[in-house]
Image: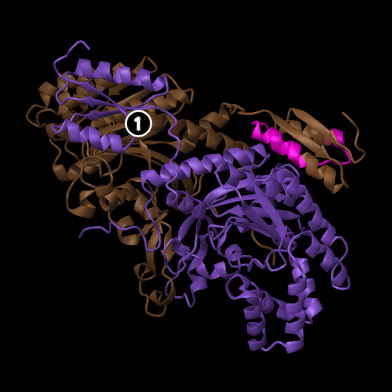
Chain colours: A purple, B brown
């Protein structure tokens, strides 16, 4: 029986043209993040099922690829539910594994620890166009820094990385979970209703403020609260003035320093932006993950409807492993989205070296073949890319094909040695 | 309940020092293989359970991490055996996925296709020191080239990559499955006994020729055959003379051209070796995988007991997917072993840029912080690595710690602006 030549549903083979672009983008990202002092780490693709199911991953926990127990531990006849069959699963993000990593290795890491991770994550999502079940994530995180220097560095590092990849004019939107909550509290929503309120608020991009208000009413919230909420958003402009306005309005709902902290981030990052991107306070920014405890941010590109990077502060996650909370803040680039945009733009990876093909006639005597290989080695040592291939009968066609792969020079080697 | 901070059994967290070495080695490998015309590809970490269990993976198939079916497809109450519960698993090597990849994408790939893969593979092996259940493999393969130009290029590319990593004086051992079989046939072993014979022959390194002969007799093979086999190995020297001897002795057991083909590989690769490594014919080389159909080779370093790279020709694997065989030959570097050796040697990754730390006093006014971030950005644009951190109370200790991370220059920024 023939084997199955297709990749698994929702996963993809990556061909050389895309892979070369990915390698290029990965190098640009790594190179720039290193200049900001981030250091690379890696965690296994597999995590224990207890950690993965710990409610740190929100909706993504429903999408875990679970791994079967092995050997004696797998007792099929006595297994009653899924949990009896599995001890581990594939990671669905890089944040939970990072918190575990820090809990496990913190004693051997500097404070603050600036982490850079690039790795595949797995989600058993419904397959759809442009969305895959295995995809690369690229995260930077700062652990052990309670102050907003973490946010400032993360935003500047990620923005300048996008600049390096040729993107400018994008917008960094920033908000605070504490402001989100204070606004909801000001409107009269109870603490235990807020998750529902925020899920609806998160649809602002698509249905507008009017749509949000209507949906809140349909959900059964009082008209008085919904109106008060709607009015607050209408009066709160984006940017610094919006913050000043809220400082006054929310003074009974918000702890001291939250507004100032956010203002400082806006000021300091604008100074580093060098006119290549903008940063705004956006009170409508929600971000789904329940683990965020403070600032949240996203990068939005005009040419797209959705974000290309997102992150925020999660000061309570490491504590789930150790019992002691550690301040933590991270920013994740939507690597796959960046690749898609660059491919759609027809981005050409800069060719680092000249590409030459040696065409070797069939039946070349061993001593001459040896000389050819030696010559190829010498050229490669000098930095050239040399492809050594058998000469086909239709040499013209062969060279045309090689030109499509970027080979620009050809050397023909015939059995009958001719002095060149 | 606290979550589990340890990585999964047999898997490991990789800290910055090792990760920087890994990144460096990966870049050296990629860079050199590209000069030989290899192009990068990637396949998913997950493959269908049918493909993984297709007897192309030898012993490794027993070590598959299997993934649980999801949703309606998982029917726990009716499941009778493991196969009812799983539809996929983690790949245990990069060769089977490559054959599937080529079967799936061959029409969009050049001929010959020179593939470079670097990726993690997974084996549920018994945990032991220095052996992990997730590890990186680094393979190059040439598909569509029937002649020995494939072997020559693979050997030269891999050897020169090891040279680039600072290794010299290693030995490439090469053999042919057809010669292995002809020698066994000459001794009188039947075709269906050969796998057993080769498993015992493979212990030569450990138990010597005498030990091999004894074990063959214990296994029940006739003394006449065992003696004839032993004598043949005694008379066959390594290198070219050994080949000439076998050409004569095995003439009734070996198809034409096999010896010449191997001689040509030895000659051509020696020419490209530039005195930095040696290559020898070794009739005792077996290599375990049953999918090999022709040449097999390994690289052995004097300082280690085992091989650091291995490969061979497998002309029948792509045909398992498409019905049409495609000549294929590959070479795999033992990436993890290389990393272990370099770490044991105390190898220092060349630092690409100067590393400077900015120490910022707490309570820095926003406008000055903005200036500092701008200055950092300018330095980073010029190529420097700048770490911006809060100044600790014990600044001397903080700087000592940073020096251990390689920071060599420090700039202190105080709230009270002082003209420097």
Q: Is residue A414 in sight in this rendering?
A: yes
Q: Is residue B41 in sight in this rendering?
A: no
* Magenta segment boundaries in residue numbering: B373-397
Q: Is residue A4 left or right of residue A383?
A: left
Q: Is residue A411 above or below residue B120?
A: above
Residue identified by numbered label 1: B207
Numbered circles on residues, count: 1
Q: Nearer the viewer, residue B58 or B90?
A: B90
Q: Is residue A237 above or below residue B344?
A: below
Q: Is residue B28 above or below residue A121?
A: above
Q: Is residue A176 above or below residue B215?
A: below
The residue drawn where x is 22% and y is 36% is B145
The residue drawn where x is 52% and y is 64% is A87
B143 in magenta: no
Give the SS element for disc 1.
helix
* Residue B416 percent across, percent down from the top left: 93, 39
Chain ID of residue with mark 1: B
B375 in magenta: yes
Image quadrant where one finds the C terminus of chain A: top left
Q: Give the quadrant of residue A176.
A: bottom right
Q: Is residue B240 left or right of residue B188?
A: right
* Residue B120 percent across, percent down from the top left: 45, 47
Q: Is residue A163 left or right of residue B80?
A: right
Q: Nearer the viewer, residue A68 or B246?
A: A68
Q: Give the quadrant of residue A131.
A: bottom left
Image quadrant where one finds the N terminus of chain A: bottom left
Q: Nearer the viewer, residue A137 or A50?
A: A137
């Amino acid at each position: 029986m023939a084997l199955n030549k297709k990749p698994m549903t929702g996963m993809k083979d990556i061909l050389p043209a895309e892979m070369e672009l990915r390698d290029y983008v990965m190098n640009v990202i790594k190179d720039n993040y290193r200049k900001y002092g981030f250091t690379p780490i890696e965690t296994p693709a597999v995590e224990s099922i207890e950690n993965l199911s710990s409610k740190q991953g929100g909706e993504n926990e429903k999408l875990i690829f679970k791994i079967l127990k092995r050997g004696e531990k797998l007792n099929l006849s006595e297994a009653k539910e899924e949990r009896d069959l599995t001890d581990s699963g594939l990671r669905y993000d890089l944040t939970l594994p990072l918190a575990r990593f820090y809990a496990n290795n913190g004693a051997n890491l500097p404070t603050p620890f600036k982490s850079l991770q690039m790795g595949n994550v797995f989600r058993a999502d419904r397959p759809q166009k442009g969305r895959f079940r295995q995809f690369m994530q690229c995260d930077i995180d700062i652990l052990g820094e309670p102050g907003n220097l973490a946010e400032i560095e993360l935003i500047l590092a990620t923005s300048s990385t996008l600049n390096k990849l040729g993107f400018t004019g994008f917008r960094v939107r920033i908000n605070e979970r504490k402001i989100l909550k204070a606004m909801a509290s000001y409107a009269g929503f109870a603490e235990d209703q807020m998750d529902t309120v925020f899920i609806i608020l998160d649809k602002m991009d698509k249905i507008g403020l009017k749509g949000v208000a209507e949906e809140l009413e349909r959900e059964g919230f009082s008209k008085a609260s919904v109106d008060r909420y709607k009015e607050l958003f209408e009066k709160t402009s984006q940017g610094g003035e919006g913050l000043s306005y809220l400082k006054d309005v929310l003074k009974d709902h918000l702890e001291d320093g939250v507004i100032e902290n956010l203002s400082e981030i806006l000021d300091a990052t604008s100074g580093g932006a060098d006119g290549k991107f903008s940063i705004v306070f956006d009170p409508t920014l929600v971000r789904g993950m329940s683990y965020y405890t403070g600032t949240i941010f996203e990068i939005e590109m005009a040419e797209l409807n959705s974000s290309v990077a997102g992150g925020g502060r999660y000061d309570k996650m490491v504590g789930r492993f150790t019992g002691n909370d550690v301040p933590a803040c991270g920013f994740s680039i939507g690597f796959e989205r960046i690749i898609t945009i660059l491919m759609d733009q027809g981005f050409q990876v800069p060719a680092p070296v000249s590409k030459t093909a040696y065409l070797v006639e069939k039946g070349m005597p061993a001593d001459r073949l040896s000389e050819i290989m030696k010559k190829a080695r010498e050229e490669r040592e000098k930095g050239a890319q040399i492809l050594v291939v058998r000469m086909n009968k239709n040499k013209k066609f062969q060279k045309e094909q090689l030109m499509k792969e970027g080979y620009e020079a050809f050397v023909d080697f015939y059995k009958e040695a001719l002095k060149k």
